[in-house]
Amino acid sequence: MHKPRSRKPSPVISRSTPLQDIFSPLQNVSVYYLILPIILLVTFLIRCAVGLAPYSGYQAPPMHGDFEAQRHWMEVTTHLPMREWYFHDLDWWGLDYPPLTAYHSWLCGFIGKLIYPAWFELYTSRGLDEYNLKVFMRATVLASEYLVYVPAVWAFVKIYNTKDTPADRGMWALMILLQPALILIDHAHFQYNAVMLGFTVVAMNALWNDQIVIGSVFFVAALCFKQMALYYAPAIFAYLLGTCVFPRLNFQRLVILGVATLSTFAIFFAPFILTGTTGQALFRIFPFARGLWEDKVANFWCTANSFIKFRTLFTSTQLQRLSLLATLVAILPPCVILFLYPRRRLLPLGLSASAWGFFLFSFQVHEKSVLLPLMPATLLLASSGNDYNRKSWVGWVNNVAVFSMWSLLRRDGLGLQYTVLLFMWNWLAGFWGLPDNWVGKLVHVVTYAGILGMHVAEKFFEPPAKWPDVWVLGNVTLSFGAFVVFWLWTLLRMWEVARKPVVKEKMKGAYTPPQPSINKQTCHFYSLSNISERLRPATAYTTNTPMTSPRTPDNLYMSSIDPSRSPLSEHDSDELLAKIDIYHNRRRSSTTNTGSTDAEETADPDRHTRRPSKTGGRMKCERCSDYNRGVMLGSCRSCGHINSVFR
Amino acid sequence: MSVSAAKQQSIPSIWQCAIASALFKALLFPAYRSTDFEVHRNWLALTHSLPLSQWYYEQTSEWTLDYPPFFAYFEYALAKVARYFDVNMLKVNNLDYASDATVAFQRLSAVFTELFLAYALHEFVQRSDVKSRRLSLISALSIFLSPAFLIIDHIHFQYNGFLFGIFVLSLTLARDPHTRLHSGILFAVLLCFKHIFLYIAPAYFVFLLRAYCLKEDFSGIRFGNCVKLGTALVAVFGAAFGPFALMGQMPQVLSRLFPFSRGLCHAYWAPNVWALYSFLDRIAIIVAPRLGLSVRTEALNSVTRGLVGDTAFAVLPDIAPKATFILTLLFQLTALAKLFLAPTWKVFVAVTTLCGYASFLLGWHVHEKAILLVIIPFSLVILQDRRLVRIFRPLAAAGYVSLFPLLFTAAETPIKYAYTLLWIWIFFTAFSRASVRSSTRTYFLDRISDLYIAGLLPLLIYTAVIHNSGLFGLNQYEFLPLVFTSVYCALGVVGSWIGLNVVVWSW
């Protein structure tokens, strides 16, 4: 006997991740105000807890590590005049980051000196390993990250998909902020990468809104904080150039861009230009004299070096030219795509692809530099609700990236943090899932098996005497292979997104082709030609994510309209308009009737979810909590959600 | 029903929270540890390497075994696993030994044994009736994620999570008449783990007597039940203390368990009536000369320093241990009378809470950690009555803030603040949204309680920032932050105690 198929959407529930379950109580208008504090506190707590770990170079004389470098720069910048910053005792962690890092060090050092001057005393404070100093330095990393990176990510998830509920957005933000690689490097190993990455995200957000001046200023800020942001520069440049050329040449825009960029550089470098030390600064920032790579990095040169001995075949200069050429070839595809199709949805992908090109093929790469291609890739988690493909690929590459830094982390004594953070992130966001196609499945399974096998082997077996570095080499080779695969995946996705014609249909989770942006000035909010577009997202939303959508009467109502009929043609709008009128009349009469008696109020379990708050004549949307003025048909300007209160 | 079913799904399960919090606690392995860490390591060592007869006599370390036998057996079992981590931690002479493996083992043992609390709370939720299951789940989550366990167990280091797991399970089993015997047995087991639970034993005694041993209409005694309970209790205590009684060590065991030589207040005053009393005395020292009262000069130093030992008062009369016991018992008796008249589960848990209150507020040498004896049972009944939510707020806020001085190191300070703030934010919202409406609410008192909680903020700012910054020369009085904390928190705890008494008698 066959039972009739149950209509309950049980498979959806079974696929929900722990993070979704934990966030589900927040899918309620009346507690939306809790989401941001919760995210801030949770990320803060985890960063603090990771910060209890030892840092790089902890009690490791004579040179200590990155922690000592940063502390030393605070010592130098607070005690010496600017013209000596890039000259002072270069053998002991001489300053080799751009000016913004120097200013930042000065600020931190200034505050630190107020608290306890001996931490940053010239010469005598070298190699200090004091408990309170560690706490102070950790606090500066946290504060810097909370001032730049965290708000930038929050803004990004907000603009990336305006149709998400605030709780969903919070979920994406938390997933991005709990990315293990960045936490491990910044808060355990000790660096300030989040500032540079944060400036980049701010720049990307600005470009998303087509604020090119702000965008370029912040990208220059990223460059002036850490020269590594150059990895992104070709992509940003190609995109901006593309927006100047397509659909028609806009020379004025080009000039504005150039002026903004150059003047920002000039302002940041001004003290050094005035004291005539720019040359030394640039020489310190770009150390061409160093080798092709440091340590064991999962890039092409280091991996291929196990098979071909480059250093015996070529001279250092030749190698540099070779790597430059290889890098140029590698970054060409993403840049060309961005130039020809300057669509904002391509930005994260393009930045990531360009940075992968640098990471895999350029010279002077650190294993920590993997954070750069990783950041825009991780941002793709925003609004990845039902797109298991995208989620599993991003999760996978993050896992591999953390694994590729294993030898560094082990040296710092961060095994515990490595294990716990990786497990926590994967478990919370449910990255165990595999992509749909068999190639992806195969790649993922093989990599994960390789990672596990390598860890087990390293733990229990001594490397053969002939190859003492065999585990490290295995790590590098595996990671390099995975990175190349992910780089190709990024290019493929870019191509797909770019080639997809701009259509107005179905928001199917993954890559929506860029919507014709609803310009606030030109949008005729209540014109009939627009109504079908306003209604569509709400329908798509309820049909795509039944698990997370709040059970408001609106959603139930909207899902009662046959989803197959969307996108609605303009022909349908009259009929719909009538329907909505009927609906709102019904709602209005029911709200005036009920609410006065207690029995009615308690009988309605969703009474808290119904009311959008009204602030100063502006309506706050239930779903995206944007403010609307002059709301017609109760639908929101920015997300199209139909709000139930229509007074 | 479908709506409430959907709502039930929309809450994370206990196990999900258990995994998430266990992972977070794993990150705290390198955090600060108090001397309790060494205490437990020493117990591991002495139970592992010495014969049973010497457990309560061993005194190589100053941290001698002063928990009842079951806890010693528990340490003995743990030591069997600890062997595989680091054998050196099991040597009695290896004082203050803390290798990485030792830390990992001890911290892991706290995390894993805490899973018993998760199990107990799971049972609590499953055994509550379908309609209130969602509310029970909120209570259960609030207990499992409580900042107290994070601060005391996973940073300071103790095994409260596991012990309170037994306690919660026992309270849960008391609900169903068929499992009341198990409840009693579990509580007896708990007493043999940690004797601080003796403070709430009167509530169990009265409840089991009234609801298990006597017939409901007082018409007679249920002899079968009495025999069952009696045998079970004898068996449990026999298993715990029997071996020591046979060896004739009982006087020694008891002297370890009940050291009466300590002072009225702990080094840091727990936020109870005696903290208020000491504070009053301190003020009286300043005021007394103007009123013409005599000040005992020899007491002046010891009051301010608050050292372990005899607390002497300069103006107010001294307090004898006997007086605190009589007071505690007196206030417990009033609550027990209510329980005797109305032996329902709700009243039982509330009276357990009241017994915890009385002993915490009036007991001799109370630790601030004992506030758990009040907060945990309170959390189990909180959603039964809307008024209780309002009473619980100042208690939880004051109780957790009063635990802050346990951690004084800089790196853990933001963790304790942020975690407690997060907990308060989430669960105060959840409680007030989920609580069942009852007839009356006293708006005036509600405002006072809100004001009180808001007042904790300046207190925290003072203790964390202003005091250390040396403004107004306040930092020369080392004890000021502690005094302010315990006195202000004591006000909240006492206030909530009065409130709970009123509510319980109104049921």
Image: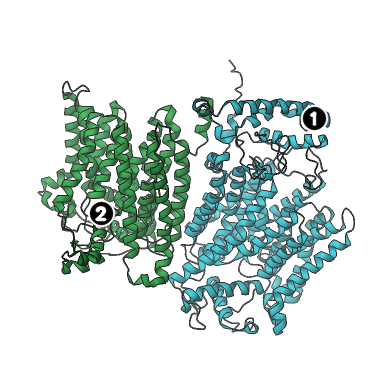
Chain colours: A cyan, B green
Q: Which residue is denoted by mark 2 in the rendering?
A: B48
Residue A117, visible in the rendered structure = yes
- For the point 71% across and 25% down, which residue is it? A582
In this rendering, position of residue B160 left or right of residue A67: left
Taking the view exactly as shown, the residue that stands out farthest to the left is B248
In this rendering, position of residue A78 left or right of residue A506: left
Q: Badge 2 sits on which subunit?
A: B
The foreground one among B337 and B139 is B337
Look at label 2 and name its amino acid.
Answer: His
Q: Quadrant of residue A192?
A: bottom right
The foreground one among B469 and A459 is B469
Q: Which residue is denoted by mark 1 in the rendering?
A: A573
Quarter of the image where the C terminus of chain B is located? top left
Instruction: Give above or below for B38 relative to A631.
Output: below
- For the point 37% across and 50% down, which residue is it? B149
Q: Position of residue B124 (x, y in %)?
A: 37, 34
Taking the view exactly as shown, the residue that stands out farthest to the top is A1
Q: Residues within 10 Å of mark 2 (few under 14, many from 20)?
A: many
Taking the view exactly as shown, the residue that stands out farthest to the right is A248
Q: Badge 1 sits on which subunit?
A: A
As drawn, the label of residue A208 is: none
Q: Position of residue A263 (x, y in %)?
A: 76, 71
Q: CA distance from mark 2 to mark 1?
A: 80 Å
Residue A407, visible in the rendered structure = no
